[in-house]
Image: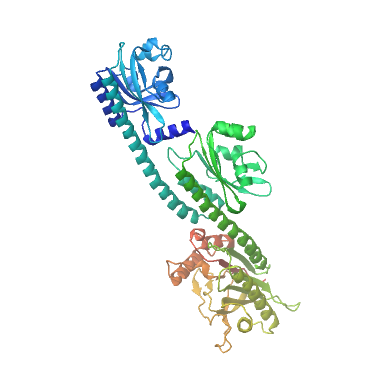
Amino acid sequence: MGELGRLEALRLAGLTAAADPGMDRFARLVSRFLHVPVALVSLLETDRQVFPGMVGLAEPWAGRRRTPLSHSFCQHVVASGRPLILEDARQNPLTCYSLAIPDLQVIAYAGMPLTDADGHVLGSLCAIDHVPRKWTEDELQDLGDLTAACSVELRLRIASERIRQDRDHAGLLLRSSVELGHSRDLTDITRRLRRLFRGPAEPSYVGLLLADHRGLWRVVDPENVLPVETVIDRLERDAAFPSTRAMREQRTVFVPDRDALVAGFSPEAVAGYDSLGLHSALCVPLSRGRGVLMWCWDAAHILEVTEEAVLTAVAGYVSQAVERILFVEVRLSTAEQLQAAMLTELPTVPGLDMAALYLSATDQDMVGGDWYDAYLLPHPAADRAALMLSVGDVIGHDVQAAAVMGQVRSMLRQASLGHPAHSPAAALDAVDQAFDALPLGPGATAVHARLDPHGDRWRLTWSNAGHPPPLLRTPDGRVSTLGEHDLLLLGSRDGPARHDHTHELLPGSVLLLYTDGLVERRDNDIDVSIRQTASTLSAEGDRPLPHLLEALSLGLEDVPQRDDVAVLVVRVTGGS
């Protein structure tokens, strides 16, 4: 961990093989006080030394501001943690074979360790002469004072970067809370997570793995499938990987570097990480054993206390988002199955063409009390059957509303079939009485209608219980609103009487019944939306009914927080 800490401090200092005004100033002071031709602020990276501060170095090294370790005396200062003072480097067994002697003309060398606040040696401040030289006590004292001052400068830069990172961590937590709180599904969680972690020092990979009876499976963003997600898309529960250990033991597992990976995990894990160029990983289990959130880096990584706390908090936000989404999916599955079982398969009726549309809402329950229905009335063998139609909406928007919808729909059928005249108004009145007698909730709206064949045309009889008005398109393309209506279904014993209304439908006429989800918008008056729907019906009414439904519902999928939508459309094609 010492080397990782040293390299992390170098990263925080923000210095590499590029000129830095502050470090160049220290090199000039060394050259001036010690009267040397070359002075360097040398920092030791993994496989090279770099010179953010430099005076007097010859080309091509001056332009590069770096050398390989074969030319480095600084590495010996870092390794020992002590000053390296040489009168003639050619005479010292430690340095006599260094390429710095012939290539950089390093003969006399005085280098002192540059340290951070934790005692890591980051490099050296050094004075270099091209001829043998005996360093005086005053010169070494001056070099020591300058080295101490340069170390203070490095520590200030590191501390400043840590403060900035702390601010970034606070911002990351805030963004995580907002972003993950708005996630729509599991794939969206993955997508939002990756947007949160970007930048040169950020993870090479952020992944979400969820648990099932076998082990862990990876949640993949189909728009951005990464190599790791094709190489390793599933892990068995007993696999010796960091992520499966985190799941089995329900604790955070951190792998700082490849050596730790080799020592602690299976050859398959090492081979998998190697194939992807990943060397370190942090795996945090989600609550209730739901899965694991993991971050991977393509180099050794030191995990500071603050960083671990922040990433663990992010994992907590992910846990909440996963719980919410899985909860909604269970409710959605149950409710959609319930509602699908209650929606009608449209009958085949000579002389009529019918189509229906149902769209679930976009809020958390994603199912509600909207319905459509169409069924034939019993008829003597010599007569053609009449057709009953209805659309409605139970007040409320949850599984309870869907259950009440099923009861109301069934009662409306029974009331129509049991009434000798099959009056739509009488059927609605019977359901209204049921609302008064039974615990069916706050109420409902509905349009209930009957179509009777008369030669080449059909007679429409309908009654409206507080529902958005049906639209009727005549063969010439004009659309009228059938606006007559009574009160909604509230269970009122003493309410006003309900009424039937009639209209003749010629061949080519199109009748549109719908629920308010088709026309109600938060940012638009409902009357305006009904007129827009009527305009679409006028323009598209001659097209096949599936195309008409597509035109009517265009853009609904993008409307946030919209209600359920139920639509039933009937075209008169003739009398038989």
Residue 52: x percent and y percent? 33, 27
Where's the C terminus, which quadrant?
Answer: bottom right
Vertical arrangement, residue 156 with respect to residue 551, above or below: above
**In the image, is 372 to the left or to the right of 129?**
right
Q: How many marks?
A: 0
Vertical arrangement, residue 348 with respect to residue 125, above or below: below
Q: Where, by quadrant of the figure, is residue 15 drawn?
A: top left
Vertical arrangement, residue 545 with respect to residue 280, above or below: below
Of residues 516 and 8, the one drawn nearer to the viewer in this rendering: 8
What residue lies at 66% left-to-right and 78% top-to-bottom? 411
What residue lies at 59% left-to-right and 88% top-to-bottom? 493
Residue 248: x percent and y percent? 64, 46
Residue 4: x percent and y percent? 47, 33
Q: Where, by quadrant of the figure, is residue 161 drawn?
A: top left
> Is residue 58 visible to us here?
no
What residue lies at 43% left-to-right and 17% top-to-bottom? 70
Outermost residue, right direction? 381
Outermost residue, front direction? 137
Of residues 60 and 116, the one drawn nearer to the viewer in this rendering: 116
> Is residue 494 visible to us here?
yes
Residue 297: x percent and y percent? 50, 37
Q: Where, by quadrant of the figure, is residue 85 drawn?
A: top left
Of residues 387 and 392, the one drawn nearer to the viewer in this rendering: 392
